Amino acid sequence: KWKGEGTTQNLESIFIGRCYDYIRIVNPAVGEKNCLELWEAFRNAFINKHPCNILPKDYELFIKLAFHTIPANKSLFWENNQLLVKSFTSGARRYMSLSDALFGFVADFLIWCGQANSTGLDYESCPTMEECENNAVDSFWRMASITYAQHSSGVIHVLLNGSAEGGAYPVKGFFADYEIPNLQKDKISKIVIWVVDDIQGPDRDSCGKNTVKILEDRLKALGYDVTCTDNYKPVLFLLCVDYPDDSNCILSSRDTDCLKIWESLK
Ligand code: ENP
């Protein structure tokens, strides 16, 4: 009856399994957590309710139980490049995006919703954002985003896609609406923006232009020290793994210059 896909099959097992994976293997530094209790708190946020009537605060208990600190200088916000972010953060080893924190990790890529007057999940369909804003998944990410932003400190990183249609910084989105307003200015030393284009993709947005300029101006007006770098090399090189022969992926331009001179002399 809804337009969106239904609840992910085996949701409970995936959720509880991910929770144990996280506390035992991915990031044992978060300490002991009761994964069954986390699942109950998560489930109670949306079961037995109309699936368009779920609010961020319904996830408060889940967030409280799953919460752990986000290490200073490790926060990474992003838009339009989820898979790149996944490989760049390297499962919290390099940076800790929201989905590398326990309270995002357990839900990443999953879909869920319940139904009114039933304790069952709806595996057939779930409401999309267009059908109703207060659906179980979006309200969850709102609550998780707010918490993640409030607890981010030190140098904050933002990874944007310069080839994204409509601009690298969506002026309406989780980052714009729930994360920027919840950053705690007194805990933040600097905001570093990286705008990386898809290799062989269009160069739609760059530092100082279009939507990135809107973002830089917004953050500066809020009093943050902001820097912006186009095609930040460590991230670009990660993309190069799939395009080893592309001209953007040749390591030293001096080598190619020498090669050209040598070729012309032959
Ligand atoms: P999209 O539309 O590129 O990707 C949405 C996918 O990312 C969904 O599969 C979602 O899982 C998963 N996901 C991981 N972290 C988040 C998240 N944090 N979030 C919403 N979905 C997330 O991403 P968006 O919608 O633009 O969100 C990007 C935001 O995430 C940025 O604000 C970034 O700073 C933040 P699922 O369960 O929905 O299938 C917050 C909102 O970290």
Image: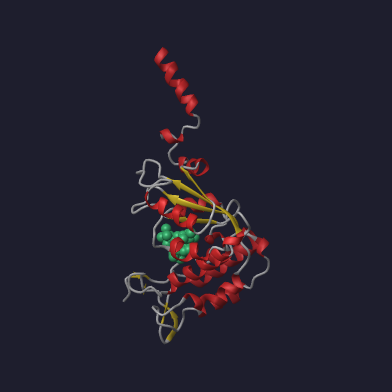
Q: Is residue 92 above or below residue 36?
A: above
Q: Residue 70, image x and y in percent?
A: 61, 61
User: In the image, is residue 11 above or below residue 233?
Assistant: below
Q: Position of residue 245 (x, y in %)?
A: 42, 33
**Front one among 182 and 246:** 182
Question: Which residue occupies 60% across, 61% down?
Answer: 186
Residue drawn 63% across the image and 64% down it: 69
Is there any visible trace of residue 108 in the rendered image? no
Residue nearest the viewer, comparing 136 with 167: 167
- The quarter holding residue 71 reads bottom right
- The quadrant where ligand 1 appears is bottom left
Q: Is residue 187 visible?
A: yes
Q: Of 169 and 116, which appears nearest the observer? A: 169
Query: Where is residue 35, by image quadrant?
Result: bottom right
Question: Count of labels shown?
Answer: 0
**The C terminus: image quadrant:** top left
Whole-percent x, y for residue 43 in the image: 51, 77
The x, y position of residue 97, in whole percent, is: 54, 58
Q: Which image quarter holds the N terminus? A: bottom left
Residue depicted at x 66% and y 64% = 30
